[in-house]
Amino acid sequence: MPPPPHRQLHPQAQQPPHRSAVHAHSQGSTAATTTSSSSSSSSCSSSHSASQTRLSQISSHIMGSTSPSVFTAAHVAQAPEDPLFGLMRAYRQDPSDKKIDLGIGAYRDDNAKPWILPVVKKAEEILRNDPNLNHEYLPISGLAEFTSAAQKLIFGADSPAIKEKRVCCRPAFPSASPHSPVHRQVSTLQTISGTGAVHLGALFLAKFHPAQPRPTVYLSNPTWANHNQIFTNVGLSIATYPYFSAKTKGLDIDGMLGALRAAPEGSVVLLHACAHNPTGVDPTQEQWKQIAAVIRERHHFPFFDCAYQGFASGDLARDAWAIRYFVEQGFELCVAQSFAKNFGLYGERAGAFHFVSAPGADATTANQHVASQLAVLQRSEISNPPAYGARIASLVLNDPKLFAEWEEDLRTMSGRIIEMRKGLRQRLEAKGTPGTWDHVTSQIGMFSFTGLTENQVKILREKWHIYMTKNGRISMAGLNSHNIDYFAEAVDSVVRETTA
């Protein structure tokens, strides 16, 4: 039965008596008017209440006829807040004018402001003035000019993986002669920054690795927190290898090599190419050679995550040294590459995933097959990648003049962070702060593992309004000439307070 028509209230019943009318009547007339108005209001209220009751009955009847929820609160647990984003929220809500944000993994200038690279501004201007610019879909594998330039950047233009045009930047299908002299190829797909690249690689390993059960992925202890859930979310098991020495605040190379030797043969080893997150501790070139020797001995599969090329040291080749060495040694491997930090394109999500086949007569065909399957996975996940950030990076990477300007911007960012490291160490040592602080300058990149305890971090936050992750990691980019003295004073005070 359809609901009754909505009952319209008389306009006059909805309006209170006008003030001028009250003053115009006598006291008796006012009383009569009030009585009449009260009666009308009571009638309207009763009618409105009846209508509301009827609507509530109809709503209850309709809602009662729906199927019960499948995803109830009992079946879907409340996920914990991401610790880093929770820290950012707490910082924003803190009203103190002395507060310092040392948690965020993004570059800030000396005034604690985001910095748009000058070369990025130039590239954006070129894009705005391009009459051929459109918003069409990119291919599944991404912008070809971007992926080819990304290969050269990470592997080197003279890399054995890509020289003599042994390159595959888009899904390829068998067309080469079986007698082709090409013995190695690289498959590259544009991704949703470095996170998307790690995910695409993890998904590929979970689906196509021939071992049964699938190999365990070994992560450094500690590592970027997101690594854990990226691999477990695609069904891969994870384990850890020792990396950071709490005693030396440097690399535990013996522990790392021992764990890699003990790992089951054919395991996947996740390696930070440079500027290790969260410790800022990188192996030396000689240590990288030791690591490569053990990985070869145990037939492990190297998976490089490179988020800071050029940002770590200001030298693009130096920061890519480990990857290039492994390629030269003939390893089959993959690389997740991000352009968030080194271009300041945090929100544009520009990245690339590279798969490098091992040398061999079957390398060309195998790599083409890999590229085709990566394209299928990409299609089902994001269909095709975003264009804007890739177009900016592509313009810079493919123009010699803009590329040189970008290198200068990289030196500006890395140089300021290096100066903050020197300044912090000098201040702590000048104060005689208990402990040793040489690790502040021996570590590299955006982050430093200070060695501060969870309790000390808590005091710094509550008493001094300084925000960092509870493991003592700080973003060096959060320090500047305006707050470094305050931070050093705070650290000195808290370390003395908690060191008995």
Image (cartoon, grey):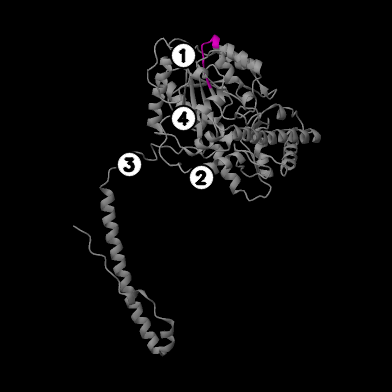
Image height of 144 relative to 44, above or below: above
Q: Is residue 241 left or right of residue 251?
A: left
**Could you give the CA–CA distance between mark 1 and mark 2, rounded to whole angstroms?**
40 Å
Taking the spot 23% from the left edge, 60% from the top edge, the residue there is 3
Res 294 quadrant in image: top right
Q: Residue 136 appears at what percent x and percent y?
A: 41, 39
Of the residues shown, which amino acid type is indicated by label 3?
Ser
**Dot placed on the residue nearer the N-terminal end, 4 or 3:** 3
* Region in magenta: 296-303
User: Dot 4, how many residues are within 10 Å of its Cα: few (below 14), some (14-19), or many (20+)?
Assistant: some
Q: Residues within 10 Å of mark 2 (few under 14, many from 20)?
A: few
Q: Secondary structure at mark 2?
A: helix
Q: Is 237 within the magenta?
A: no
Mark 1 lies on residue: 182
- Say which label, 4 or 2, has the lower sequence index: 2
| Of the two numbered discs 1 and 3 in the rendering, the one whose residue sits closer to the viewer | 1
The reply to whether the magenta stretch includes residue 299 is yes
- Percent x, y for residue 210? 41, 15
Q: For mark 4, what is the residue?
A: 144
In the rendered structure, are the residues bearing label 4 and label 3 in contact, judged by CB atoms less than 8 Å apart?
no
> Can residue 61 be seen in the rendering of this structure?
yes
Q: Which of the numbered marks, if any, corresponds to residue 128?
A: 2
Q: Which residue is mark 3?
A: 69
What's the distance in space between the residues labelled 2 and 3, CA to CA? 49 Å
Q: Which one is earlier in the sequence, the residue at label 4 or at label 1?
A: 4
State the CA–CA distance, disc 4 to disc 1: 21 Å
Residue type, mark 2 in image: Arg
**Amino acid type shown at disc 1:** Val
